[in-house]
Amino acid sequence: MPYSKTDYPASLKNFMAPVRSKAIEITNALLADGNDESKAIAIATAQAEKWAETRNIRIRKKGK
């Protein structure tokens, strides 16, 4: 199931918008390649966090 800015996994709800968007992009690419949904979400989350860290982008909303 492809995800969007308004329809995404609950595990991404506390992420800042740019990081969530990157995770959604990666998840959709992994799903298109035939990966399992839960595995795709986990991989995408880790990769989006690394992406944000290298760009000094805050990963999660304050207090989360």
Image (cartoon, rainbow, N blue to C red):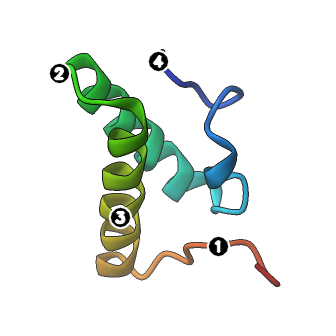
Circle 4 sits in a helix, a strand or a loop, which is it?
loop
Residue in view at x 42 percent, y 44 percent: 41
Q: Which residue is mark 4?
A: 2
**Residue at position x 39%, y 53% in the image:** 42
Residue matched to label 2: 33
First in sequence: mark 1 or mark 2? 2
Q: Say if 62 sits above or below 29 in the image.
A: below
Task: Compute the Cα span from label 1 to label 3.
Answer: 13 Å
Question: Label 3 vs label 2: CA separation?
Answer: 18 Å
Mark on residue 60? Answer: 1
**The C terminus: image quadrant:** bottom right
The mark nearer the N terminus, 1 or 3, is 3
Of callouts 3 and 2, which one flags the residue occurring earlier in the amino acid sequence?
2
Name the residue located 71 percent from the left edge and 28 percent from the top edge: 6
Q: Residues within 10 Å of mark 2 (few under 14, many from 20)?
A: few
The span from disc 1 to disc 2 (Cα, nearest Å) is: 28 Å
Q: x, y percentage for residue 61?
A: 73, 72
Q: Are marks 1 and 3 in contact (CB under 8 Å)?
A: no
Q: CA distance from mark 4 to mark 2?
A: 12 Å
**Between marks 4 and 3, how big is the CA–CA gap?**
18 Å
Residue type, mark 1 in image: Arg
10 Å neighbourhood of mark 4: few (<14), some, or many (≥20)?
some
Residue 46: which disc? 3
- Asked if residue 27 lies left or right of residue 21, the reply is left
Q: Earlier in the sequence, mark 4 or mark 3?
A: 4
Q: Quadrant of residue 58?
A: bottom right
The crowding category of the residue bearing disc 3, from other C-alpha atoms within 10 Å (few below 14, some 14 to 19, many at least 20), is few
Q: Which circle's residue, 4 or 2, is located before the other in the chain?
A: 4
Which mark lies nearer to you, 1 or 2? 2
In the rendered image, which quarter is residue 28 located in?
Answer: top left
